[in-house]
Amino acid sequence: MKMKRFYMFGLAALLAVGVPTGTAGTARAAAAENDTAALPVSSAQPAAIQAAAVQRVQMGQADQLWVPLFGSRAADQGSIEKTAAVVNLLLKNAKPSTEQLVGEDAFFATSVDVMLTDGTDINLQFKDSQYVLIQVGEDKYIAQDATAIKEFYALLAAVSPQTDVSTHKPAIGQTVRISGSDAGNYEGTVRIFVETSGSSGGYRTAMGVDYPSKRALLVYTAHYSEARYDFQFTMPAYGEAIDGTFKPITPGTYDLYIDTGWRRSSRSVTVAPPAAPTLTINGVAVNDPALAPIVLNGVMLLPMRALAEAFGWYVRWDGTDKAAFVSTQPDTQGFNPGRGAALSLWVNSKQLTGANAKPVIVNGRVYLPMRATAEAFGFQLTWTPSVRSALLVIKPQLLDEGAYAGEAKKLAATKLLNSYVNAMNGRDAAALGQLFVKNGTPAQSFEIIGQRLITSVRSVTFEDRPGGALLAYVTFSYLFDPYGNKSGTPGIVFMQENGAWKISDVD
């Protein structure tokens, strides 16, 4: 499947036709002689550079950028050494010059930026197959070396950006692997969208996420490092629309967009229906076998123990009374409704009634009816027959602020904790920033935590700290943690700033 790329001219075109040897650039530069005459000219020969001193190399032509090379990346060392060697050949032949490329000649010229660890920036612009314009800091030069220029183009071919998708016929619930080297920064976010055919135009959400069009659905977000990425995700049955709602991905043909924030590429894919019923929670496909749903008599069921672990619930199965107990708080009283003739489900000490509100035992495991359980906890559940999937939209279980009504400091911290959970789950950087003292940051960025959700605040313990600060050890329950963690207990420090309580640190 041919990959579409969104730039005007590629390396293949350069290599096919050769480097331009016309004189248009010189003519335009001559026309701008009055402007260039005032430019500073260095009489000193530029110094050679060391490969070990190279921090980053960025090559580009028009609106196409090649894969950056980083001095900190071991795999780039060979290319950086070649770059330094060619740059030194050109610097050795450099002569002071006021010449510059302007207009289209400047835009379409191949360029190389070499940034050194001491802050020096060396910029090279290839004028034609013989000459290179060089700027070192504020000093400007020109160098003639056809051999060095040819070696640079060979290097460009070696670092041409690549993107690969493991399948162009993904089924809902199937694992898809995407790898690439077409990001422009050292680290950042890559987003995967699916979009039906039609006119496109960029749109930015209130959360600052750029969508390729209003029809696009966001299906996955991953972190990239060193301008490269390699990750797997489960094709979900639902994607996040530009308005923040989740919409089904009906089987059919889509454009799959891979957006690094620097470059966007796409390929046509055919999304197939799932092999078995699937569950999506807040837009994320559930691929944990322990949470695999089953459907009996038209009712979706989920395993009680795995479900409780995922959401931080407390559960108990009473085989004698044939009752399943689910609660957001520990069952310290050992609630016992009495022996019943049929299976029963109790949520927060209240029995759920109705034909589709009974637990089911399958192969020795207790399963809960998903819809009845979700409604009891205030969640939204949508079943979409076209994708044989259910969408569960959850809200985290937060701390009871009323429990600290008489303790001003703890009450302020509790409110901040609840707001912190909502901001982290909502990926709301602006709201998160308002919770912290000046220059304070959360322990992990959104890119690092991936699609992780905080499903509940299980417990909190407060300790007074010197200077009036307050330390809270908080136990969170996690879902979709990229490292497989089901829970975590960070220490969160609160302090006053300008009379208001804020978060100062999250370990």
Image: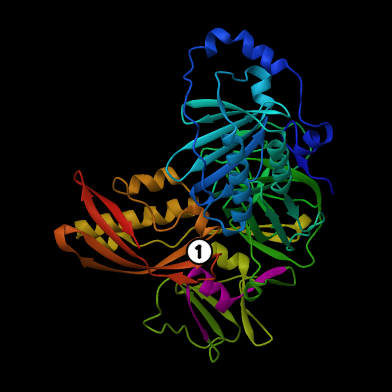
Quadrant, the C terminus: bottom left
Residue density around tag 1, few if under 14, some if 14–19, many if 20 or more, within 10 Å: some
Q: Tag 1's secondary structure? A: loop
Q: Is residue 347 left or right of residue 330?
A: right
Instruction: Name above or below for residue 328 compared with residue 384.
Output: below
Q: Amino acid at mark 1?
A: Phe
Hey, which quadrant is residue 405 in on the image?
A: bottom left
Q: Nearer the viewer, residue 438 or 205?
A: 438
Answer whether residue 312 is magenta in the image: yes
Q: Residue 326, image x and y in percent? A: 49, 75
Whether residue 276 appears in this view of the structure is yes
Q: Nearer the viewer, residue 311 or 20?
A: 20
Residue highlighted by disc 1: 377
Q: Is residue 405 left or right of residue 473?
A: left
Instruction: Name above or below for residue 106 compared with residue 74.
Output: above
Instruction: Name above or below for residue 497 compared with residue 466.
Output: above
User: For the point 63% across and 42% down, which residue is it?
Assistant: 86
Q: Residue 96, image x and y in percent? A: 53, 23
Whether residue 235 appears in this view of the structure is no
Farthest residue, direction bottom: 320
Range drawn in magenta? 299-317
User: For the point 80% across and 37% down, which residue is it?
Assistant: 15
Q: Nearer the viewer, residue 96 or 139?
A: 96
